[in-house]
Image: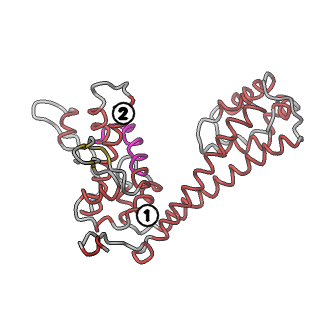
């Protein structure tokens, strides 16, 4: 009551009335499925593969390698591979490994690894192998659910200009753009980017008790999912070439590129800048513009010329 009488209130924007409740549900469900899928993947790699077929782990090069799971369903143990001849195995597994450049050589290398495998000598039709295959099927099911949510998000945001505009930012894809819009709502309701940074928890604050005052650091009192989305986008943007976020990151770690704490601070600074730029793009209804090369009189193009024309 005291806060109400003093006028210390904050407006509440109902997601259902504002029209982005469905986006929040899609985003939250996607995160839960992604977490469950990650736990399932760690279980496959750290437990099941380590027991039954440890040599197959080096072939898992990407988290979206569906062929890997389909192959394990057909050949879960080295014994299921060595039970066939080399030619018969290549023919049976030809369609399971997907499209590869040197498929013949690839399958032959798997066959050789199965012959000298250190995995447990279990029977392919044993209950232990059956539980392994159940975990693989669960991983595939979670992958299909994640893909269905991605398609649903793309369909729901097909006519949303802000959704397409956010994806012009380096490091921001469909899912991160969905998370930003789902948690932020309409970014135009923030008249200044500092209000939006405070909503995200990117503002600086200090704890004070009596005459003691701590150092200024991130408040982290805002939306944690927004900070997570911009952090993910920042980690991707700094790996890309020739963008202002990569330049800011390099400038931060210039003193000591091997300092892990300095890299963490640099990524935080890049995430803050990305939130500020995202708010500016939506507010002014423009797409992100990266570096633009132009000729300097008496010379060609240079990195300084590209930096001079970058989007702040």
| Residues rendered magenta in the picture | 229-244
User: Which residue sits furthest left?
Assistant: 297
Residue 267 is drawn in which quadrant?
top left
Decide whether residue 241 is among the magenta residues: yes
Decide whether residue 188 is among the magenta residues: no
Q: CA distance from mark 2 to mark 1?
A: 29 Å
Which residue matches tag 2? 263
Depth check, front residue: 292 or 48: 48
Q: Is residue 245 left or right of residue 126?
A: left
Q: Is residue 46 above or below residue 140?
A: above
User: Which residue sits furthest bottom?
Assistant: 17
Give how far across and how far down residue 171 sits, in percent. Answer: 40, 46
Residue at 54% over, 65% down: 152
Which residue matches tag 1? 182
Q: Secondary structure at mark 2?
A: helix
Q: Earlier in the sequence, mark 2 or mark 1?
A: 1
> In the rendered picture of this protein, how many numbered marks are placed on residues?
2
Give how far across and how far down residue 219 sits, in percent. Answer: 33, 50
Give how far across and how far down residue 110 sits, in percent. Answer: 74, 29
């Amino acid at each position: 009551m005291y806060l109400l009488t003093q006028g210390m209130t904050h407006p509440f924007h109902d997601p259902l009335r504002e029209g982005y409740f469905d986006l929040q549900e899609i985003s939250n469900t996607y995160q839960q499925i992604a977490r469950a899928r990650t736990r399932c993947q760690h279980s496959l790699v750290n437990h099941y593969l380590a027991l039954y077929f440890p040599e197959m782990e080096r072939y898992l090069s990407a988290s979206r390698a569906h062929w890997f799971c389909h192959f394990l369903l057909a050949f879960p143990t080295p014994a299921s591979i060595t039970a066939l001849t080399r030619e018969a195995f290549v023919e049976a597994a030809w369609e399971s490994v997907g499209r590869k450049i040197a498929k013949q050589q690839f399958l032959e290398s798997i066959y050789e690894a199965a012959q000298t495998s250190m995995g447990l000598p279990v029977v392919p039709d044993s209950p232990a192998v059956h539980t392994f295959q159940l975990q693989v099927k669960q991983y595939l099911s979670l992958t299909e659910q994640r893909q269905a949510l991605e398609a649903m998000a793309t369909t729901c945001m097909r006519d949303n200009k802000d959704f397409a505009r956010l994806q012009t930012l380096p490091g921001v894809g469909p899912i991160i753009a969905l998370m930003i819009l789902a948690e932020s709502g309409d970014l135009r309701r923030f008249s200044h980017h500092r209000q939006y940074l405070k909503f995200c928890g990117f503002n600086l604050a200090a704890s004070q008790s009596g005459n003691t005052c701590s150092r200024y650091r991130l408040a982290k009192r805002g939306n944690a999912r927004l900070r997570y989305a911009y952090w993910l986008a920042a980690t991707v943007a700094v790996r890309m070439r020739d963008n202002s976020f990569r330049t800011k990151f390099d400038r931060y770690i210039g003193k000591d590129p091997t300092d892990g704490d300095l890299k963490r601070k640099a990524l935080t600074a890049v995430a803050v800048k990305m939130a500020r730029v995202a708010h500016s793009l939506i507010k002014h209804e423009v797409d992100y513009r990266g570096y633009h090369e132009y000729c300097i009189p008496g010379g060609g193009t240079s990195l300084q010329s590209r930096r001079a024309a970058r989007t702040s």
